[in-house]
Image (cartoon, helix red, strand yellow):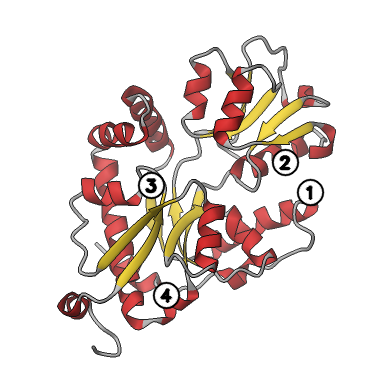
């Protein structure tokens, strides 16, 4: 094997295994739908429910590659986890809101003072709730903030145990079908940046580095396929996650109207965006000390992403 193997070198020996974290109906489904799952190396997909768990898996040496919002890697700095950000996944921010029940009298975020508000801790929902409260002169201490997973949050919301719920994804249309309404959207608060994270050991291993570069290019092409085949993608994805196809397609259309999904190289803009999130968490007392996120980012794959067509 050459010191800097090409994908064809890897195919000849077929010894390289790329261990990839995925969400339900995620990367593996996208790549298969786009006809891009003919990897010239072994690929093992493992399903996770959140970016924080993927960060932990990378730190434990169980995973080579994953994706998350900007937020889990910030906590990785605090825990001294070994993880690097190698690319940005830019996408829409339409499915991120604070919901209130149909019988709620709340008109603005200010009306939530002293109320029970569910949120998903250490996620975009945590961040945008802090920012929304900040805009009306409140903090998390001014509400009865209750950290809940998405399933637990939906259950509590349906039972009337929450006055409001900061959430994201398909839980929103599910709750809206039962009369919930959007109190405020985080569309203009969030950057739309998700990140692709990798194990430093995987980046340092020549064969895996080439495999990661190839995988990123396939992801980029699969994203382009999705954007051009939204109806077909929605049908496949809806079936995989067991959500009504109409809801998935409508959500995808609204998202695409705001911003197409694409994979981008590491940039100063993306680093600055994550730094703003980290500073917000520090000021809100969510993390104990100010952190410099620049240490998380490496541009080792910028050229590969840029030249991928």
The answer to whether mark 3 and mark 1 are in CB contact below 8 A is no
Q: CA distance from mark 3 to mark 4?
A: 26 Å
- SS state under label 1: loop
- Residue plotted at (63% across, 60% down): 74
Q: CA distance from mark 3 to mark 1?
A: 30 Å
Sequence order check, earlier mark of 3 and 1:
3
Q: CA distance from mark 3 to mark 2?
A: 26 Å
Sequence order check, earlier mark of 3 and 4:
4
Neighbourhood count class around disc 2 (C-alpha, 10 Å): few under 14, some 14–19, many 20 upward: some
Q: Position of residue 202 (x, y in %)?
A: 42, 75
The answer to whether mark 1 and mark 2 are in CB contact below 8 A is yes
Q: CA distance from mark 1 to mark 2?
A: 8 Å
Neighbourhood count class around disc 4 (C-alpha, 10 Å): few under 14, some 14–19, many 20 upward: many
Q: Nearer the viewer, mark 3 or mark 1?
A: 1
Sequence order check, earlier mark of 1 and 2:
2
- SS state under label 4: helix
Q: Which residue is mark 3?
A: 261
Sequence order check, earlier mark of 3 and 2:
2
Q: Tell me if residue 200 comes above or below residue 240 in the rendering.
A: below
Q: Does any portion of residue 286 appear in the rendered image?
A: yes
Q: Position of residue 199 (x, y in %)?
A: 47, 71
Q: Which residue is mark 4?
A: 202
Q: Which residue is mark 2?
A: 130
Q: Nearer the viewer, mark 4 or mark 2?
A: 4
Q: CA distance from mark 4 to mark 2?
A: 35 Å
Name the foreground residue: 85 vs 131: 85
Quadrant of image for the N terminus: bottom left
Q: CA distance from mark 4 to mark 1?
A: 34 Å
* Drawn side of residue 150 relative to residue 170, left or right: right
């Amino acid at each position: 094997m050459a010191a800097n193997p090409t994908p064809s070198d890897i195919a000849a020996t077929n010894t390289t295994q790329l261990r990839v974290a995925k969400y339900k109906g995620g990367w593996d489904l996208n790549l298969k739908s786009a006809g891009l799952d003919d990897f010239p190396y072994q690929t093992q997909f493992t399903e996770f429910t959140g970016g924080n768990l993927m960060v932990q898996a990378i730190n434990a040496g169980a995973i080579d590659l994953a994706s998350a919002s900007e937020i889990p890697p910030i906590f990785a700095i605090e825990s001294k986890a070994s993880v690097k950000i190698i690319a940005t996944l830019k996408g829409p921010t339409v499915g991120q809101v604070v919901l209130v029940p149909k019988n709620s009298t709340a008109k603005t975020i200010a009306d939530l003072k002293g109320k029970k508000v569910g949120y998903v801790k250490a996620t975009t929902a945590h961040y945008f709730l802090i920012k929304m409260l900040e805009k009306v002169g409140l903090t998390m201490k001014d509400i009865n903030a209750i950290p809940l997973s998405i399933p637990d949050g939906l259950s509590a919301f349906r039972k009337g145990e929450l006055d409001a719920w900061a959430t994201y994804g398909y839980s929103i249309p599910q709750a809206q079908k039962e009369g919930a309404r959007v109190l405020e959207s985080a569309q203009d608060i969030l950057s739309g940046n998700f990140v692709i994270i990798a194990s430093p050991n995987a980046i340092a291993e020549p064969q895996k580095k080439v495999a990661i570069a190839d995988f990123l290019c396939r992801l980029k092409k699969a994203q382009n396929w999705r954007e051009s085949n939204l109806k077909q993608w929605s049908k496949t994805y809806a079936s995989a996650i067991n959500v009504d196809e109409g809801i998935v397609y409508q959500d995808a259309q609204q998202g695409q109207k705001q911003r197409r999904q694409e994979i981008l190289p590491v940039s100063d803009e993306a680093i600055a965006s994550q730094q703003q999130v980290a500073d917000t968490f520090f000021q809100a007392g969510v993390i104990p000390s100010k952190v410099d996120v620049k240490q998380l980012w490496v541009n080792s794959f910028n050229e590969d992403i840029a030249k991928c067509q």
